[in-house]
Image (cartoon, rainbow, N blue to C red):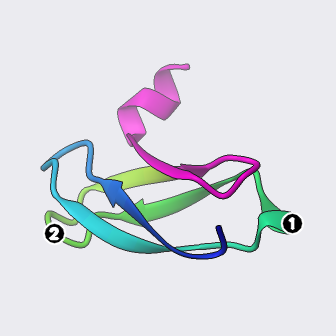
Amino acid sequence: MEGQGEVQCPSCFEYFAVSIPPVVECPTNLDYDCEVCCRPMVIVVDEEGAAQAQSMDDTLSG
């Protein structure tokens, strides 16, 4: 699923599009700032290229 993906900000809950890396580069984590509220987050991309946003607090506590 290379190209664009849609994620939901864990802080403001707004949806926005992000660029997804090629599947050969997945799984990966991308540092990202919300395009709506500018809060930092990590976008987790799985082996198949599906993206999900997590707050920085979630990734630091694990």
Point out the tag, 2 or 1, that comes first from the N-terminus. 1
Which residue is found at the position 43% from the left and 64% from the top? 32
Q: Is residue 40 above or below residue 23?
A: above
Nearest the viewer among 11 and 6 is 6
* Residue highlighted by disc 2: 36
Task: Say what secondary structure mark 1 lies in.
Answer: helix
Which residue is found at the position 66% from the left and 74% from the top? 2
Q: Is residue 7 above or below residue 55?
A: below
Q: Which residues are magenta?
A: 44-62
* Residue highlighted by disc 1: 24
Which residue is found at the position 77% from the left and 57% from the top? 26
The answer to the question of whether label 2 and label 1 lie on touching residues, with beta carbons closer than 8 A, is no
For label 1, count other residues whose C-alpha is less than 10 Å away and answer few (under 14), some (14-19) or many (20+): few
The x, y position of residue 21, in whole percent, is 68, 72
State the mark number for residue 61.
none
Residue type marked 1: Val
Which residue is found at the position 78% from the left and 65% from the top? 23
The x, y position of residue 45, in whole percent, is 62, 52
Relative side of 9 to 25, left or right: left
- Cα gap from disc 2 to disc 1, whole angstroms: 29 Å
Task: Say what secondary structure mark 2 lies in.
Answer: loop
Residue type marked 2: Val
The x, y position of residue 52, in whole percent, is 46, 47
